[in-house]
Amino acid sequence: MVGFNGYLKLRIGEALDLKPTTFSTRHTVIFNKAPQTLDPYIVVKVDDYKVGQTHTKQKTNMPTYNEEFSLNVNEGKQIELAVFHDTPIGYDDFVANCTIQFEDLIKTSNTGETFEGWQTNSSLVRP
């Protein structure tokens, strides 16, 4: 597979129906609290290199972001979108992730289809 060379413009719209992990709900059982909502944010990586992060949305399992990330990519193989729950103490909790191969994204962006349930409104421009 040949890597992607060009300009990537990625818009993060929303995340739907996020669920707290077992680890993040450990205190709800111990202290008999109501089910927890999340304080989610999304980390964007290209080939395991962090290129951006959305703002944290408070107390929601269906956050809306509408944030854009733009960058030049050289020999890019994949984009990773990882959702985390912001915690006040310790490390943030991992919630979910999706890895998209540039090769697959280019194919679907040319046809207007979606990629595995993620709406792809990204712009890929080759020199």
Image (cartoon, rainbow, N blue to C red):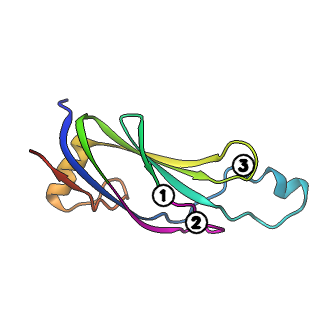
Question: Is residue 111 toward the left or the right of residue 39 in the image?
Answer: left
In-front residue for pair 116/80: 80
Q: Nearer the viewer, mark 3 or mark 1?
A: 1
Q: Which mark is residue 22?
A: 3
Instruction: Farthest residue to the top: give it.
Output: 1
The part of the image, by quadrant, that contains residue 101 is top left
**What whole-number distance in Å separates the C-alpha atoms at marks 3 and 2?**
20 Å
Bounds of the magenta span?
55-69
- Residue 95 spot, x, y in % from top left: 59, 50
Amino acid at circle 3:
Thr
Q: Which residue appears at 73% of the width and 43% of the height?
A: 90
The secondary structure making up most of the magenta span is loop
State the SS at label 1: loop
State the SS at label 2: loop
Q: Which mark is residue 54?
A: 1
Mark before the other along the chain sequence, 3 or 1:
3
Q: Nearer the viewer, mark 3 or mark 2?
A: 2
> To which residue does mark 2 refer?
57
- Residue 60 spot, x, y in % from top left: 62, 68
